[in-house]
Image: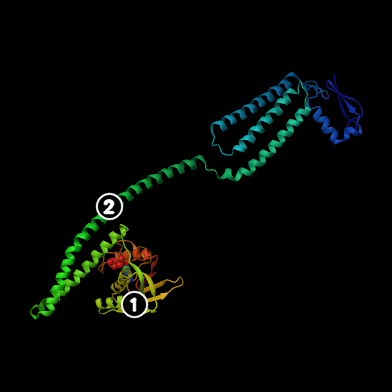
Amino acid sequence: MFTIYLKEDLIKDSLTCGNCTVSPINQTAESNNIGFQVQSFFSNLFNTNDWPARWNCGTWSDFHGWLYIISDLTIWAAYFAIPILLLVIIKKRKDIPFLNIFWLFIAFILLCGLTHFIDAIIFWWPAYRLSALLRFFTALVSVITVFSLFKLLPIIFKLRTQEELEFEIIERKKAEEETRILMMRQEATNNLMNRKDEFMSIASHELKTPITTLKSSLQLLQRMVSTNKELEPTKMLVDKAARQTKKLTGIINDLLDVTKIQAGKIILNNAEFDLSLLINECAEECEIENKECNVHVRANSDLVVYGDRSRIDQVLCNLITNAIKYSPNSNKVNVIAEKIDNGKVKVSVIDQGIGIPKNHLDDVFDRFFRVENSSQNFAGIGLGLYISSEIIKRHNGEIGVESELGKGSTFWFSI
Ligand code: ADP
């Protein structure tokens, strides 16, 4: 028989419940004080004198009691095994994500298991204070786990599923294979380009000597024709041959320039010079070559720049020649030179020619690029603008084009 003491306001007289007697407790002012209660709680943590063992409290059949005890002990055993398994996982998989939440789960499950364990033990050992303390810690860890898990939710929702990861791996492998094939092709193209450059270099060098001889022979012949009346009927033919040889020389020089650019061997002889003078000379030269064309120059007289005069001359001549060449229905080209903000000089060559389609504006400065549809009717090999852009880049300048198909183009550079 056990006696349980309860507050006087709950019961007035002693009651008998199963094997225990419930009696009113005599409350003193000291026992009402919360500080006293806490101190007494901890100092009597393992003291079980205030309660009967659970077997003795109420009426338990053996079946009911053991069902309770065995179930609690089984839950405890399982709750003890789960943290061990989690620990093994953490030890084996060092890359495991959300490690903190794993530790919280371990603590939470372990504490839950212990509350079940103590519930089973209480049938013999009524350590209700210890049980309350354990439940308090379980509650604390549960709340922290809930909070931490809640905070992790957005990250967890963003995690990819196994299917998504497998799909990603397949896609990546595909991309890697494509990159590998592309790199192989790129290497093959580079090899071909190198061999082509090598061929161009050898061919242009080999052609240069006979062309020079041919040119000087033709010049000699031109002189002879102009002084000898008998040879006058051949004048037209000789002049034509001289013009074609000049063209050929231009092409060979372009090829030689390209090989120099590719090898990084283009040399600039920089000095200060008057750009407006050069523009006027160049415009005049182009007008002589293309008699029906008018090149109108608008340039201030104080446009002194620092650079390689002959290379800038080459750029100017190329832009003006192109402007004339690609303007079959117009005989006027405007050249404007002006100082711009950063102290540089900007030269624009404006024509009212065939223009360039928008999608090819960036390509025209590429090696061997020619606008397919339009340039078929005009002679050229697509190197002039490439060489010009390289020359301007070497002068730390900029080159560009604005154009409208069918209306004309403005090629400009600034140095
Ligand atoms: P080429 O004139 O020998 O073909 P370029 O490098 O000078 O080589 O020019 C590249 C291409 O840019 C030309 O084939 C032509 O299609 C286009 N292009 C250049 N200048 C003009 C222009 N003023 N008007 C229209 N198209 C042009």
Q: Quadrant of residue 120?
A: top right
Locate the N terminus by quadrant: top right
Can you tell me which quadrant of the image ligand 1 is in? bottom left
Q: Position of residue 88 (x, y in %)?
A: 57, 29
Quadrant in which the C terminus is drawn: bottom left
Q: Is residue 212 above or below residue 51?
A: below
Numbered disc 1: secondary structure: helix
Q: Quick check: 77 above or below 196?
A: above
Give the answer, above or below, for where 161 lies relative to 286.
above
The verdict on label 1 being within 8 Å of ligand 1 is no
> Residue 4, position in %: x, y?
85, 25
Residue that label 1 marks:
277
Which residue occupies 62% across, 27% down?
A: 81
- State the mark number for residue 226: none
First along the sequence among labels 2 and 1 = 2
* Image-based side of 245 in relation to 56, left or right: left
Above or below, 375 against 168 in this view is below
Dot 1: few (<14), some (14–19), or many (≥20) neighbours within 10 Å? some
Q: Position of residue 366 (x, y in %)?
A: 33, 61
Tell me the kind of residue under disc 1: Leu
Residue at the disc numbered 2: 192
Q: In x, y percent, where is residue 322?
A: 30, 71
Q: Residue furthest left?
A: 230
The residue at 73%/25% (across/down) is 118
- In the figure, residue 380 lies in which quadrant? bottom left
Tell me where residue 384 sits by quadrant. bottom left
